[in-house]
Image (cartoon, rainbow, N blue to C red):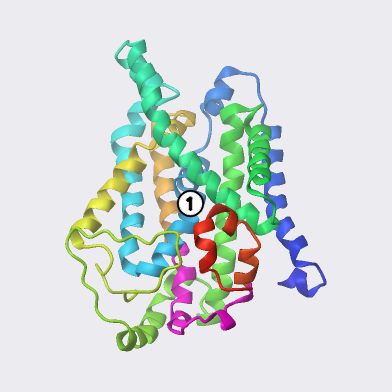
Amino acid sequence: MLAEQLGAEAAQVRLLILTVPLVLIAIVGVATRTRQASEFFAAGRRVPAVYGGLTFAISAFGGTGLLAITGAFFLIGFDALCLAIGGLAGFVVMGILLAPFLRKFGAYTIPSYLGARFESAALRMVAAVLISVPVAMFLVAELKMAMFATSFLTGASGLANLLSIGLVVAVTIGAGGYRAVAWSGVAKSILVILALLLPVTIIGIWLTNLPLPQLSQGPLVRSFSRLEAAQLPIVIAPGLAFDMPSDALTALGKRYAAPFGAIGPHGFVTIMLTIMMGIAVAPWLLPRIASAPGVYQARKSLGWATLVFGLVMLTCDRPPFFCVPSSSRILLPARSPNGFGSWRHSGWPKLWPERAALMPAG
């Protein structure tokens, strides 16, 4: 907003928002190039616990979590806590049952650990094939979110954005291996936390006069809960119900603070345990423990990851929480925000053509 008031074009501001972080991350990746095997595969096993915890937490959150979890909190409120609780529990399980033993063994990856532990090259190959499936699914989801963000900021086609993302990744990690991944991941994590905390803090000060938006929920809940009580019915989902929002434009159907309106009690526990086990054994997270200096530092990095992940989760539900009071008004196409029109001209119709007809004319 300040740049636009100083005369900068909106397109130039969006381009700077995209390119400046990417250039900084690429510079860090290029600066950490190496030819030593231990540095290339495990960053020399000397990544401090704080930095390891940062990369653990933000890698688990990801671009998909930034969009999906924030939207889930807005649409189903309390019920989305199963995602946050499951993620936190997953780091605890990883830190107690898995990470110390993997680091003590000294293997770089899960397949190499299984192959050496059971002295079986076939098991190592089978494990690599099986692990590649969830890794590919996670990578596709992250690329889709990255393409959507770059299309929104630049207006370029999906293929051009995909090639640009691939080029940045190749430049960042091509010459440095995991050493580049680790230290560029630290830079990315700091940027993500700042990008999440700063606007939410500003909005929190504007609405509640509190610099800590995580502590501003009480007064706002009391104010709009009365409005929700007059406009929305009490919804009680069946025990195993699991009605998570899709990528479509969805109407608000439950009260924000009311539990078990979209996800039933048993479904809440089930998805919480599923997320917990998924985070604990995630093949894109667990091998990162190989870069810790030792077993103690491995446990400590998981402790930092739990703290950072919890802070991020407490913060990512603030934007939808601040938007809930204003969502009680019906959004007509003639009164829709100007951003809806720009979404139509960005990557939204290209990525989700079946949803383009739902966008208000702009």
Instruction: Return the residue nearer the eye: 335 or 25.
Output: 335
Instruction: Return the residue nearer the eye: 145 or 335.
Output: 335
Q: Which residues are magenta?
A: 315-338
Q: Which residue is mark 1?
A: 64
Write the residue at 57% across / 83% down.
335
Left or right, 241 with respect to 189, comes to: left
Write the residue at 45% across / 59% down.
247
- Residue type at tag 1: Thr
Residue 39, picture quadrant: top right
Residue 100 lies, in percent from the top left, at 35, 31
Residue 67 colored magenta? no
Residue 301 lies, in percent from the top left, at 44, 41
Left or right, 332 with respect to 161, comes to: left
Q: Secondary structure at mark 1?
A: helix
Residue 320 colored magenta? yes
Write the residue at 61% across / 33% down.
180
Q: Where 154 sits versus 341, above or below? A: above
Residue 70 lies, in percent from the top left, at 45, 62
Residue 29, picture quadrant: top right
Write the residue at 38% across / 62% down.
245
Residue 10 lies, in percent from the top left, at 74, 66
Q: Quadrant of the N terminus?
A: bottom right
Q: Quadrant of the C terminus?
A: bottom right
Q: Do we see residue 258 in this rendering?
A: yes
